[in-house]
Image (cartoon, rainbow, N blue to C red):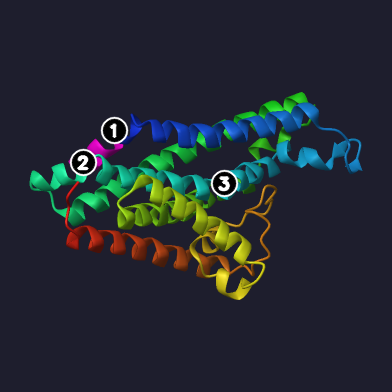
Amino acid sequence: MRLLASGVRKLGRRLATWLTFGLLTGLLAVVLIVVGATAGPSGGSAAQPSNLALVTFPGAYDSVLSFILGLGGLFAVIYGAAIAGSEWTWGTLKTAVARGESRNRYILISFASVAVVTGLGLLIALVVGVGAALIGATLAHVSTSGLTDGTTLSRLPLTFIKGWLAIVEEGALGFTIATLARSQLAGIGAGIAFYFVEAFGGYFLPNVMKYLPFNVASAAVATPGNAFGGGGTPTVALEPNSALLLVSIWLIGSLAVAALFTERTEITA
């Protein structure tokens, strides 16, 4: 627990943390406020324009979650790669091993710190996003009576937890790639490439791509109001429970590879 708490505090001061989750939260807030400020009757009735669905509660909760889960995976890959790569390029892993820390324990707790900080960042993004949707609804003169809808609020915590697990799995992929490459830039570049290859690969090999990490993450947390979506790839989606199982397998497998590599490789930097 000491090492985990220390890792969380360390990440809280990292520029990468503030940039990653600040950018995600800022984009979400700007989009929802602009939608509310500029919305007009672009389809549907004049009383309820179709583009105002993004800021109309209770559907706005799903809009916020869809945005976070749609872009959060890419941000998580970059963040995980940045943190893992820095352990090698900054020499912090070498220092920890030199003072007697177990390699496996250190690398796994380092990722656990990433997972905790990711959860906090997503929670802040969710709260800010709901606030931005409220502002957008006010600007567009849309009723907020659905804000306290019991059915939606009751399923929100479980959906958020599933979303956190899915995004952590995507972060683990970036973390592992950067660990194997022992480089932040290589990990980030390869992680982004993997993201887009999987996205566009759905057009050609949908029955294969549906089992890959980004698509299983999307399928595991599909929301009813998928307003922002996950890239529009025509990949055949898995059943949510099956996708969630695959998310767990990808997560555990990625961390196992990172731990095994760290245990066996020669640490020179």
- The spot of residue 164 in percent (x, y) is 46, 49
Q: Quadrant of residue 68?
A: top right
Tell whether position 185 is magenta: no
- CA gap between label 3 and label 2 equals 30 Å
Pointers 3 and 1 in contact (CB under 8 A)? no
The main secondary structure of the magenta stretch is helix
Residue 5: which quarter of the image? top left
Tell me the residue that label 3 is attached to: 71
**Residue that carries the numbered disc 1 in the rendered image:** 9
**Exactly how many numbered labels are in the figure?**
3
Q: What is the x, y in percent for residue 167?
A: 47, 51
CB under 8 Å between discs 2 and 1 = no
Instruction: Point out the tag, 3 or 1, that comes first from the N-terminus.
Output: 1
> Which element carries disc 2, helix, strand or loop?
helix
Say whether residue 9 is magenta.
yes
Q: Can residue 24 be seen here?
A: yes
Q: Which element type, helix, strand or loop, lies under badge 1?
A: helix
Name the front one of labels 3 and 1.
3
> Which mark lies nearer to you, 2 or 1?
2
In the rendered image, the vertical position of residue 229 relative to residue 95, given as above or below = below
One can see residue 1 in this view? no
Element carrying mark 3: helix
Give the magenta part as a residue range: 1-10
* Amino acid on which the number 3 mark rests in the picture: Leu
Q: Residue at x 24, y 51 (%)?
A: 107
Q: Quickly name the residue at label 2.
A: 92
x%, y% of residue 12? 34, 32
